[in-house]
Image: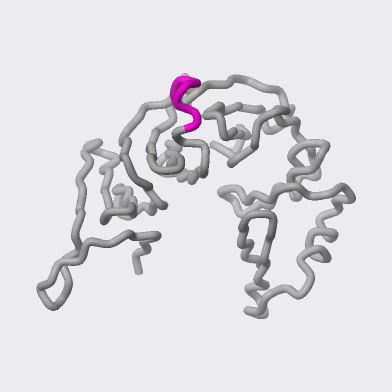
Amino acid sequence: HHLWLKDTHSVTCVNLTTERFVDSVGDVLKEFGVEEDIQDLFVDIDNVVWLMTNKGLYCVESKRTYPIRKGVELQDMDVFQEKYLLLFYNNGLMEVLDLKTGKVLADSRAYAKELASKYDRSSVLMNAEQSLFQLRNGKDESIMMKLDPQTWQWKTLLQLPYHMNNFTLQDSVLYIPTSYGYYTYDLKTEQTTHVEQLQMATGDKLLTDINAMAFD
């Protein structure tokens, strides 16, 4: 019943039951049973909270700590198919861990090492129809990829010289808001389209940066 809002070096928490901001986020974190300093916080596809400490990545639900690589930034994570823990680092590396044993099963890079600095600023993940999609942004450019869970290799779907901000799924189509309108990616046909300008009710067209999209 909590909504977590992350920013650089800070976390804000909203109690969705009371619809109020939590006065002391530290008190909520203490309830998870972690005594070490918390360096980062993540939430997986099942809304389970994961906390990164100097000992590793701690799962609040299972009370288990998983090892993470040293010398690189753990940028994102998720649980895939209820049996794999996927760890995403800022250098483009992905590690696959067995959720039960913690053993590293595989690792792969989405792109060559020399391209890592182009997409090292942020990561957004989407579990959709038995596949995993990822957006990565750098200072200026962005890339969207699809993971093959059979080989743990990536397929590049879209590369842009500007940012892709997020994505949402509706009727087997991914909608990707960007700095210039939005893109769609059809999961069934694998076709991509670009809607650069929005058609307004007045008949005017609007060219704008779209941060997020949702369907009601």
Specify the quadrant of the image occupied by residue 101: top right
* Residue under the image location 65 percent in, 71 percent down: 14
31 vs 104: above or below? below
Magenta span covers which residues?
111-117
* Residue under the image location 66 percent in, 79 percent down: 20
Image side of residue 157 versus residue 189, left or right: right
Q: Tell me if residue 116 is in the magenta stretch.
A: yes
* Residue under the image location 69 percent in, 52 percent down: 49
Image quarter of the N terminus: bottom right
Provide residue 91's location: percent of width, then percent of height: 55, 29
Q: Tell me if residue 124 is in the magenta stretch.
A: no
Provide residue 48's location: percent of width, then percent of height: 66, 52
Image side of residue 37 versus residue 61, left or right: right
Image side of residue 168 versus residue 35, left or right: left
194 vs 142: above or below? below
38 vs 109: above or below? below
